Image (spheres, helix red, strand yellow):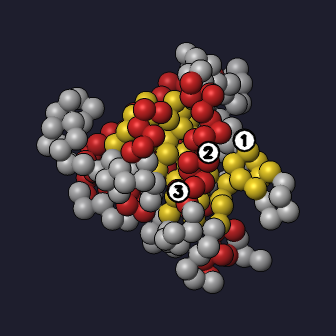
Amino acid sequence: MPVALCEDGTTYRLRLLGTHVLVVGATGSGKGSVIWSTLHALGPAIRDRLVSVWCLDPKGGMELAPGQRLFARFVYGDPDQPDSNGTVGTAYEVEFARVLEDAVAVMRRRQATLRGITRLHTPTTTEPLILVVVDEIASLTAYVVDRDAKRRIAAALSLLLSQGRAVGVLVVGAVQDPRKEILTVRDLFPTRIALRLSEPDHVGLVLGQG
């Protein structure tokens, strides 16, 4: 998908099918722009129901709420937001876990259907590509207060990142701090985009040494 311009004026294209994408950058470096450019490029596929976007915005919806009508599911860290059962007052951290666990359920079902038939899911209107977008993914991996929710989020996220690519359940995440103690699943993202980083060592953490 065309998502940006390179320094020489050529189009930068991001391959999304069959991969997970991690966008790393300091505050104000443009992580949100990468996410919005990706959503913009996916617009026709979202319209045609070939892509279903499940959005988790732990920053209270401040980043991605303007695109809410594009999202099949939208959880934004509001303790007064109804959960998936329509109940108000459920800890929003638990709702983050539920969305990820539902994505794992889709992944498991597709694995059973596609096993022995194909190694890469082809999006259709009945079985669209599920794109889980997480703005500031560290809010789910390092800063969750509810211990049970944190455990559930870690388990579901690890399963999605290790097994979801082939069956069309993909994750696009953004983070400021790429250290392993903040993002333990960093190495499970095959595609990584480094923007302006706050520490020299972060370059190697994101893109690999050298």
Which residue lies at the image location 76% right of the left edge and 48% below the top edge?
A: 13
- Residue nearest the observer in this picture, 100 or 50: 50
| Classed neighbour count for the residue bearing mark 1: other residues with Cα under 10 Å, few (<14), some (14–19), many (≥20) | some
Under mark 1, the amino acid is: Met
- The image position of residue 105, as x and y in percent, is 44, 31
Indicate the quadrant containing the N terminus: top left, top right, bottom left or bottom right: top right
Residue marked by disc 3: 32
Q: Position of residue 92 (x, y in %)?
A: 25, 48
The amino acid marked with disc number 2 is: Thr
First of labels 2, 1 by sequence position:
1
Side (left or right) of 12 relative to 194: right
State the residue at coordinates (70%, 71%): 208
Quarter of the picture containing the C terminus is bottom right
Residue 173, can we see it?
A: yes
Element on which disc 3 rests: helix
Quarter residue 90 falls in = top left
**Dot 3: within a 10 Å radius of its alpha carbon, few (fewer than 14), some, or many (20 or more) residues?**
some
Tell me if label 3 and label 2 are in contact, CB under 8 Å.
no
Q: Which residue is mark 1?
A: 1
SS assignment at label 1: loop
Q: Which residue is mark 2?
A: 38
Quadrant assignment, res 44: top right
